[in-house]
Image (spheres, helix red, strand yellow):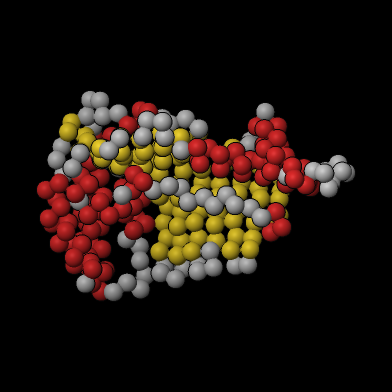
Amino acid sequence: MKKLLAVLLAALVLLPFAFTEAAALTPEEELEAEALGYIEQAKAIIESGTFTLKAKMRYIDNNRGTRGTVSVVWIYDKENAQKLYEMDIKDIVNTTFYMQGAKFIERVTLFIFKCLFQIVPLLAGRKVRGFQVGSQLFVSFPQRCMYSSDAFELPYFRDMGFYEILPLFDFYIDTDNIIEVKKEGNRVSLLYGDGDYSKLFEFTDGNFSFYREVQPNGKIEEACIDSLSPIADQSYFSTKGMMKIRLGWLAVPFGWLEKLMAR
């Protein structure tokens, strides 16, 4: 069913060319149409504004020597004006604080932050969720059954606004720049390239499963996608049974560290 839907979607994309190409599609063209259809499906889900996406994101910046993998969950619910971003604190520690070539003051400040963030999981658990319901902003720590409505006074949450972060998938494909389309077992992949820029899409059983983007500036972004659903999982927004805590008072010491980092 997914394959049929993918081919139909791709057919709509290629419809303008249908009258100039009377001959039947070759197996290679059919495979390309199938891959393009899967890309259109994933794009439609993300752009609908209502979805649940669970993935492991990997970032590499060869210029700054930064790299790391972060486990994340994105949930957007357009109808109810809700959005959420969940991340693993341990992953953030291992990723954010790996920096080669940083200034001495940056290294000292990052070390302080790292010490603090090593303690946070013990107190708050590894998972942290930033989310918005209507105009209200919250941070919750589901593994410790706690949530805060003033945590966004902290520089970390305020500056990142991480509940607003969208998965950075570039679904645009110029068919003239498709390098390769392959099918291996139940996996279909499409490699697209334009100069020093390239994108790789992989779909397993018709489901979006992997994405890699290589940029000319040496940055690489990868996503191993556990699941992508057109339904917003409402359980992530619930604070039922959680204790409300105040975190805004931490804004002062964190503000000092932020100023130290900016020197």
Q: Is 227 placed left or right of 31 in the picture?
A: left
Residue appearing at x 14%, y 50% in the figure? 250
Q: Is residue 170 above or below residue 243?
A: below
Residue drawn at the location 53% of the way across and 37% of the way down? 45
Q: How many marks?
A: 0
Q: Is residue 213 above or below residue 28?
A: below
- Residue lying furthest right in this view? 23
Instruction: Give coordinates of residue 11: x percent, y percent.
Output: 72, 39
Can the viewer see residue 174 in this picture?
Answer: yes
The picture quadrant where one finds residue 260 is: bottom left
Asked whether 185 or 206 is in front, the reply is 206
Task: State which quadrant residue 67 falls in.
Answer: bottom left
Please indicate whether residue 105 sits to the left or right of residue 179 in the image: left
Whether residue 87 appears in this view of the structure is: no
Q: Nearer the viewer, residue 210 or 151?
A: 151
Quadrant of the frame with the N terminus: top right
As drawn, 235 above or below 33: above
Q: Residue at 41% across / 37% down in the picture?
A: 76
Q: Residue at x 22, y 47 (%)?
A: 152
Q: Give the x, y percent position of residue 31.
A: 74, 44
- Quadrant in the picture for residue 148: top left
Residue 18 drawn at (x, y percent):
80, 43
Where the C terminus falls, by quadrant? bottom left
Q: Position of residue 237 (x, y in %)?
A: 32, 32
